[in-house]
Amino acid sequence: MKKFYITTPVYYVNDVPHIGHTYTTVAADVLARWHRSSGEETFFLTGTDEHGAKIEAKARQLNLEPKQYADEIVEKFKQAWRELNISNDGFLRTTDEAHIKAVQKALQFMYDKGDIYLGKYEGLYCRGCEQYKNERDLIDGECSDHKIVPEKMSEECYNFKLSKYQDELLKKIKQDKLRILPVKRKNEMVSFYEKEGLVDVSFSRKNIKWGIPIPWDSSHTVYVWADAFLNYLTGLGWDGSTPLTRGAGGLDFWPAQVQLMSKDILRVHSTIWAAMLLSLELPLPEIIFIHGYFQINGQKMGKSLGNVIAPADLIKKYGVDATRYLIMSAAVFGHDGDISSQKFDEKYNADLANGLGNLVARVSNLLEKNNLEINLKIDSDKKLTKAYRENMENFKFDEALKLLWQNLRRADETLSATKPWKMQDHKAIKKILESIAQDILNAADLLKPFMPAVAEKIIAQFSVQQIKKGEALFPRI
Ligand code: MSP
């Protein structure tokens, strides 16, 4: 059976889940559901990134032990994904005992082969990024993402020979052996490799206690990114042994078909993560897909701006499936998007309350009133299914939705134009309603990855001979 493995980043626990994390996770869920329903053996992994200076500092601020603090936040992530009906098969915490052991084993392997060596690192360290920054990346001396002045750090550390993998990785990226999508992102990375190139990177920290001890020198902890990347393997049950052949050590699903994330972490993935895999003698993921970044009313989302949208707020207002729909249709997938509560309200009313919901109500009501018996079959619109499939395969989720809504709108127009409620001839009424009901059923079937519960509800409602009017799917706001 064909396998499909999809991952989201492991999210930092210094923040509660917001609409940005939700975007990635819902999109991954849509893909996972789509591949599962296409008969592929699917594994969908998400999780949390819990070590490092940032989390440690945050916990101390709250007078908590880092682990205790992380436990609380992790629950919030799990709860958010449960509420959103996310179908992840695994949830990896980087503080899991098995993950820690595997990370140590993997690093030992890299050390033994000479890819990790004792050295010194000097640079400007941004805690927000948990990365050393180049002077040229700073704006007025500050990290442009976190608006803080990075600290000068100089320490003895173990370095990873990232530079060793420059040529091999550049070649693989150019040849799409490591496919970075959209192509614009691939080009950015090729240009990064060609203009700046890979330099060795520190893989250990001496002054950070909240991390995984370096197995051969416990006065150091593992660099949080090196630790976090390996989640993609340990989340499958990998114990850190390498090299290995497929089928052994819980790595049945590696390499991933799709690793989903946004542009903020593209560079680290297509450099350090990819190089770690080469060092571990494991295959590279097939596709790294970079989706766009959400802004709210033209502004970066942030706690200090007080404009953070939490998934729970949306669910309370719109319901689970509507929230999933609104998020997935908010932007062209792969492009940045600007969202706002007003836009969500408008879209909810137009597409769901007055759109899909109203059409379902009108048609089922007319069928019930006229006491009509009809026979529908799922998947009778080959052309629609084909176009939809093409969009899904090319990560055009918003397009796939648009396509379904075009069809629903057309059905709605037919209903308004033909006015079967004014007609007397039962046969003619039946003909019109049957064809529109068929359109609804087809759309509902293809909507399953996006709106699993609503789709099933409509399918159940339209799969009987005597269709009855149900409760309103999307009450108007
Ligand atoms: N812990 C690291 C990732 C390690 S993966 C080995 C991390 N965590 S994070 O919590 O900051 O998550 C970043 C990711 O969350 C982004 O790449 C994206 O997937 C998602 N998003 C966070 N904010 C976002 C927006 N405003 N818009 C869209 N997605 C965003 O980085």
Image (cartoon, rainbow, N blue to C red):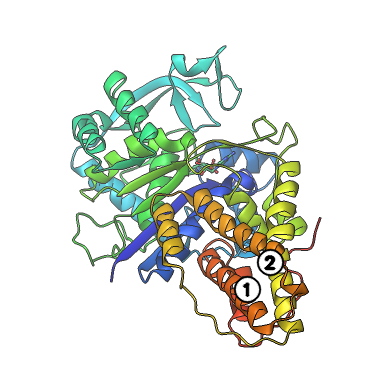
Of the residues shown, which amino acid type is indicated by label 2? Thr
Q: Is residue 359 left or right of residue 389?
A: right
Residue located farthest toward the top when viewing the structure as drawn: 140
Report the front residue among 418 and 326: 418
In the rendered image, the vertical position of residue 131 relative to residue 65, given as above or below: above
User: Mark 1 or mark 2, which is nearer the start of the sequence?
Assistant: 2
Quadrant in the picture for the N terminus: bottom left
Q: Position of residue 260 (x, y in %)?
A: 44, 48
Residue position marked by numbered label 1 in the rendering: 432
Classify 10 Å Cα crowding around label 2: few (below 14), some (14-19), many (20 and above): few
Quadrant in the picture for the C terminus: bottom right
Q: Position of residue 343 (x, y in %)?
A: 71, 43
Residue depicted at 71% across the width and 73% down the height = 420
- Residue 411: tell me if it is visible: yes
Q: Quadrant of residue 336?
A: top right
Residue depicted at 70% across the width and 81% down the height = 425
Q: Position of residue 270 (x, y in %)?
A: 34, 37
Q: Is residue 35 left or right of residue 433?
A: left
Q: Do the residues labelled 2 and 1 touch (CB within 8 Å)?
A: yes
Residue position marked by numbered label 2 in the rendering: 418
Of the residues shown, which amino acid type is indicated by label 1? Ile
Identify the secondary structure beneath mark 1. helix
Q: Where is residue 233 in the image (x, y as percent from the top left)?
A: 35, 55
Report the front residue among 71 and 325: 325
Q: Quadrant of residue 356?
A: bottom right
The Cα atoms of the two marked residues, 2 and 1, are separated by: 8 Å
In the rendered image, the vertical position of residue 374 relative to residue 168, given as above or below: below
Residue depicted at 64% across the width and 31% down the height = 300
